[in-house]
Image (cartoon, helix red, strand yellow):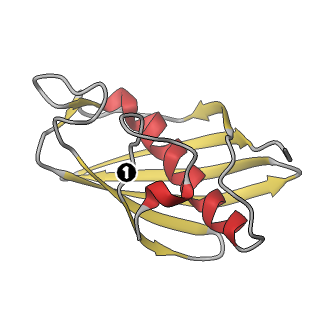
Amino acid sequence: MKAVDYIPHATPMVFVDDIVAVGDEWIETTLNITSELMFVAERGLPTWVSIEIMAQTISTYAGLQGQKSDRAPRVGFLLGTRKLNLPVPYFDLGTTLKIRAERQYIHEGLGQFLCEIEYQQHYISALLSVYEPEQ
């Protein structure tokens, strides 16, 4: 499934390609690192974009959940990020990232997700706090 169908984003601000798997409390997506992505430099995609990649994976999860209630994808807000470690400065062009977001907590639109990006032999993880308003 194409993730863009479940998020309120459009090119060039899309940082998630495909939904690989989804469960009640988690989602796995992929992103192919191409020269068409926003923020790509000569060396590749800067890893500081990991925050947005994780946030869009969470947004995809929320969009899938909303679809169960016939609700269109809604804009959400990233409130904070904890424990983000970037072991490399860039994701190389031509590589594919595997992203996983697992819901830790959600209540009245506030949520926390443990996210991980698998890149070559590296794992980039962070705890993201998010908010999705009711309207």
What residue is disc 1 on? Answer: 117
Q: Is residue 13 above or below residue 124?
A: above
Q: Is residue 101 left or right of residue 36?
A: right
Residue 100 visible at all: no
Q: Is residue 109 above or below residue 38?
A: below
Q: Is residue 54 left or right of residue 123?
A: right
Q: Nearer the viewer, residue 98 or 2?
A: 2
Q: Could you say which quadrant of the image residue 1 lies in?
A: bottom left
Residue 79 is situated, as x and y percent measured from the top left of the image, at 69, 31
Point 55% across, 58% down: residue: 6
Label 1 Cα crowd, 10 Å radius (few <14 / some 14-19 / many 20+): many
Point 45% across, 46% down: residue: 125
Point 62% across, 52% down: residue: 113
Q: Is residue 90 above or below residue 130?
A: above
Q: Is residue 87 left or right of residue 55?
A: left
Q: Nearer the viewer, residue 53 or 103?
A: 53
Q: Is residue 52 left or right of residue 71?
A: left
Residue 108 is situated, as x and y percent measured from the top left of the image, at 89, 51
Point 18% across, 22% down: residue: 41
Label 1 is placed on what type of residue? Ile
Badge count: 1
Q: Nearer the viewer, residue 69 or 47?
A: 69
Q: In which quadrant of the rendered image does the C terminus lie? A: top right
Residue 117 is situated, as x and y percent measured from the top left of the image, at 37, 51
Q: Nearer the viewer, residue 113 or 123?
A: 113
Please, what secondary structure does the residue beneath circle 1 have?
Answer: strand
